[in-house]
Amino acid sequence: MGTPRILVIGAGIGGLVSALLLAARGCDVTLVEKAAAPGGKMREVAVGGRRLDAGPTVMTMRWVFDRIFDEIGEALDRHVTLTPATVLARHAWSETERLDLFADRSASAQAVAAFAGPAEGRNYLAFCDQARGIHDALKDSFMARERPSMLGLVQHMGLGGLRQLWGASPFGTLWDALGHAFQDQRLRQLFGRYATYCGSSPFAAPATLMLVAHVEQEGVWLVEGGMHRLARTLADLATAKGAKLRYGEAVSEILIEGGRAAGVRLAGGETLRADAVVSNADVNAIATGRFGQAAARFATPTKPAERSLSALTFAAVAQTNGFPLHRHNVFFSRDYAAEFEAICRQGRLPEEPTIYVCAQDRDEAGAAPAGPERLLILVNAPPCGDRPAFPPEEIETCLRRSLARMAHCGLEIALQREAMLTTQASDWEALFPATGGGLYGRSTHGAMASFNRPGSRSRLPGLYGTGGSVHPGPGVPMVALSGLLAAQSVVADLASTSRSRPAAMSGGMSTR
């Protein structure tokens, strides 16, 4: 047989990474994307005559991208300019209650002690040690494995790793674990927010998610030109390695022949044959027949109750005053439990939301040019995008309450309607069908939730998955890692079925 033909559905980060790695290995790769540009949720929008990121805004786990670029014989720094953030995020509860977390954990400990007392400063350091232990125990045994099982996890981690994991009460919730770690409820709230990084509630997510604290301490990076620049770079490199990227074309069906994926049919009727298909679509899109009823039999639907959180976002160019914004800022609600009760159980926007603001013109020191600045304002929302959209008056009420909460913390934002783009769950559903607007695949609720995510190999031979709905889960580095795992699986499976392909597939891909 000749050069393996690989068809990739979707130019999100996972699809781009898979396409890049497989093209670099000599495969004949075609990537089909219905949008006009790469990036998927890592999108860029035009607002007020300027362009800004309107999706993920935080880059962590640089080692994932270093590994990907190393696989193709390139260096990340040659293609993307990254600056490490000294201040990870600025947090506020009122005009007098502010707390910065720093990349340097001793600086953070001092800040926590000044904010909540010396005992909490010591508790923070103990919390960091626990978070690092969990991270180190799970990094190779869970994150970087194609589809780990509980038994395999136990076998791979050894006694030391199990001791670290058990110390975090993995069968308890993050919220309960934080109640043991801190006395100050504001700190419990701050670190409970890590559950939302994977679209989950801190009141239902497992305690192991405290590992995010260590992930951030390993480095939060500012990408010159914005996060969308990273997607563009991956797309350009994939093209340079020989992949064909076709934008503005949608896939209507995954073709099955001889009991395995054999290519796709485009919405316009064209058929593209392939030896393997890598899908960067949400797994639920396959399960609900968006790519044909034949393929749907090989995927498990996501129940509405299992969806991750959605978001209500306002991408804006606006003048700010008062509160000294940094790149990443969080303004907390006064009642976290009520906030998640509204979102997760009642399916409505909260009375008083917690607000994240990414001030995209702020540099590593927090300085910004004079005049209006680019802002992405985000509040968590229920994943109800397949139901009628929230009416304008409800969106307006949520925005007004958000502005009031930020004003309570000292931040005044002069929004201009003509320089603002609103995106709610129904818009996310239109962009990413069959998700209900949930932005992170299945929610990570319960100790076993992470094991319920599909791996890169689907139940249909020749069909592989990448993206936030498959292992190891959502978030920019995790999705990139899923693209790497999908490419590894394709390489291994094609090599095992043909002895005539070693020139294109030799050596596999490293998993160090």
Image (cartoon, grey):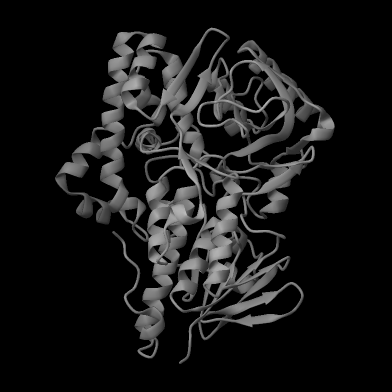
Dividing the picture into quadrants, the one containing residue 318 is top right
Residue at left 22%, top 54%? Answer: 156
The answer to which image quadrant residue 363 occupies is top right
Residue at the spot 58% in from the left edge and 9% down from the top edge: 95
- Residue 258 appears in view: yes
Q: Residue at x 26, y 56 (%)?
A: 152
Q: Position of residue 185 (x, y in %)?
A: 43, 15
Q: Is residue 5 left or right of residue 419?
A: left
Identify the image quadrant of the N terminus: bottom left
The image shows residue 116, relative to residue 466, as above or below, that is: above
Measured from the top left, where is residue 235 in percent x and y? 58, 62
User: Whole-percent x and y of residue 511?
Assistant: 31, 61
Query: Could you say which is closer to the camera, residue 245 or residue 134?
Result: 245
**Image position, residue 434 (x, y; %):** 65, 54
From this view, report whether residue 509 is shown above or below residue 406: below
The one nearer the camera, 101 or 353, is 101
Q: Residue furthest left?
A: 159
Q: Is residue 282 visible?
A: no
Give the position of the C terminus as an image quadrant: bottom left
Name the residue located 56 percent from the left edge and 30 percent from the top edge.
327
The residue furthest right is 418
Task: Decide: is 208 above or below 252.
Answer: above
Q: How many marks?
A: 0
* Viewer-nearest residue: 1 or 231: 231
